[in-house]
Image (cartoon, helix red, strand yellow):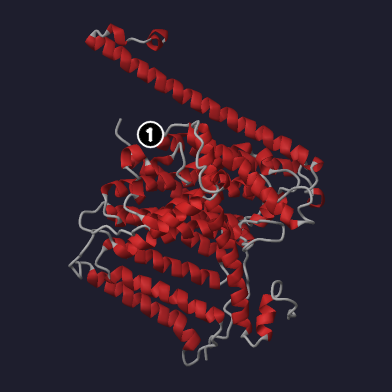
Amino acid sequence: MPQVCDNIISTLAPCLTQSGMNPDVAQFISILLGVVLVASFPLLLVIFLIWVERKIAARVQDRLGPNRVGPFGLFQNIADAVKLIIKEDITPAGADRLIYNLAPIVAMLSVILIWAVVPFTPYNIGADLDIGVLYFVAISSIGTLAIMMAGWSSNNKYALLGAFRVVAQLVSYEVPMVLALLVPVMLASSMSMQDIAFAQLGMWFIVLTPVSAFIFYVSNLAETGRAPFDLIEAESELVAGYNIEYSGMKFGLFMANEFMHAFTANLLFAVLFMGAWAGPGATSLPILGFIYLMIKTAIVYIPSLILRATVPRVRIDQMMAFNWKFLVPVSIVNVIVMAFVLKLVQVLGLAPSPENASDFLANIPQAAALLLGNVVVIAAAMALIRGSVRKERLSEAAKLAQRVQVEGDKEALPATVAQH
Amino acid sequence: MLELNVSTLVFFIFAVLSIGGALGVVISRNLIHGALFLIVSLFGGAGLFVLLAAPFMAAVQVLVYIGAIAILIIFAVMLTRSMTNIREIFNRQWWISAVAAVILLAVLVVGVVLPIWGPNGTQSEMVLSETTATVQDLGVALVDGNQYVLPFEVASLLLTAAMVGAIVIARDNE
């Protein structure tokens, strides 16, 4: 359909064509502008996010946080960014220059590219891919690569150790994350982000499947390397982890990337489980949808910040055991149970028909059935935890009892041993 | 003759990435660089899948090959002792790979190049397949009794067996 040049804002490509430009090139330029717009938004947002995070962490720790530059210290991070840019840019002597310089760029890329499939409003999405969810998983796996590149090329043992931990952590936690993502895909019967958003008009998926929402949230915390899973840059053990040798704006990129990744992960949580832009009036006034999305993201993002400022870091073996012995089995069982219940609901005719899929009341029977399935999964998971914790406690007690026998160390006998 | 439009241009970019990356893998003296060139090459391949309107294949290429296999390769390389400044150009198996490469080239020439650009070729205008498959078609094909459900299940069983085997090997003898 040949478009007419109306004004330069809404019909840029036809206007460029009219002024004598090749139509292909004009199309390319207008797409490029869209890409620049979507990609710049997170970059600007991150300045604000760092301020939010510092303020909240400060409040949790009974401090004031940044309060000197601008109102409430809002411009502190702009000052910090300027400082980072004018700082000396050091490359260590033994570093692999090309990879060392490439790593922050790849890290940034792996987060910004995710924004391409985020449905901001019912009509505005970077690219409504058929494979949106898979695209997200694929792109976030590149982040692992960036951290490996940074860790290896720095020629520093702490950086390399940090990089090794990344592989263990990020690759492991990708498994429950992908399995948790399968459930929204099944519920919406589509991998497109926009279809998933539309499928939640009647009922948010967090109501239908709280277990996968929980697994996705926890594995996202680990994927973004946030406390309690911040072993990637455990300051007490690795000094700073993979980015120890980076200085100036290259370090700034890694730091901005971490904040942006955390926000993006929560944004995706809001999209996949909390209905993205869905809310009153979102279809008639798209900007409202964008505001709803940001509010929903904040609702899940701010608890993760408080969590970060509150909980201690877990040990690496605890982290791996939690993933492989708890999250992975639970998420596999969850996928099977959800698939079974979903089919059962369809066979019994409890599922809402396509016409009234966005009606809240029509969704209630299906939601009830799915919730029941979730309760079964939760009960099984609790039993699993209970069993393993009990076993651990018994083995600790047995060890202590043995020590008491060998050394005659009666004082080491705590109350727990006496109980068993 | 080739028409120079955007998709041709993009094709050339991805082709250069793909072939250049592959060349880098074999000629680089640093194993980590080699592994990273492999990623460049695989990324080029993913781009070509997008151009062929197969986004699912592209995403799987990035996820499985770059996100999992290439990272495992890098991890393994990091644990090897001498990974930089490799002096040997050939190892003992060079002739096997040479034979394999020649056979592969012959297959490609006979199977792809000659039928299209050969003397009795169909030229490049011919559409090879009328089907445009969506992700849904792919999903249905994998679980449809008349299509690929058996190979799919066999592959799943094989992967499960491999996983169980890996766990058994990795575990301590208790």
* Residue B142: quarter of image: bottom right
* Residue A154: quarter of image: bottom left
Residue, x 65% and y 81% (percent of image)?
A16
The residue lying furthest to the left in this view is B87
Q: Is residue A278 left or right of residue A248?
A: right
Q: Is residue B11 left or right of residue A99?
A: right
Residue, x 49% and y 32% (percent of image)?
A61
**Camera-side residue of B142 and A65:** A65
Residue A12 visible in the picture: yes
Q: Quadrant of the C terminus of chain B?
A: top left
Position above or below: A416 against A31? above
Q: Is residue A401 left or right of residue A20?
A: left
Q: Position of residue B54 (x, y in %)?
A: 56, 67
Q: Position of residue A126 (x, y in %)?
A: 62, 63
Residue, x 51% and y 89% (percent of image)?
B121
Mark 1 — on which chain does it sit? Answer: A
- Residue of label 1: A315
SS at circle 1? loop
**Camera-side residue of A265 and A337:** A265
Residue B66 visible in the picture: no
Q: Position of residue A39 (x, y in %)?
A: 56, 62
**Camera-side residue of A382 and B107:** A382
Q: Position of residue B96 (x, y in %)?
A: 26, 70
Q: Amino acid at mark 1?
A: Arg
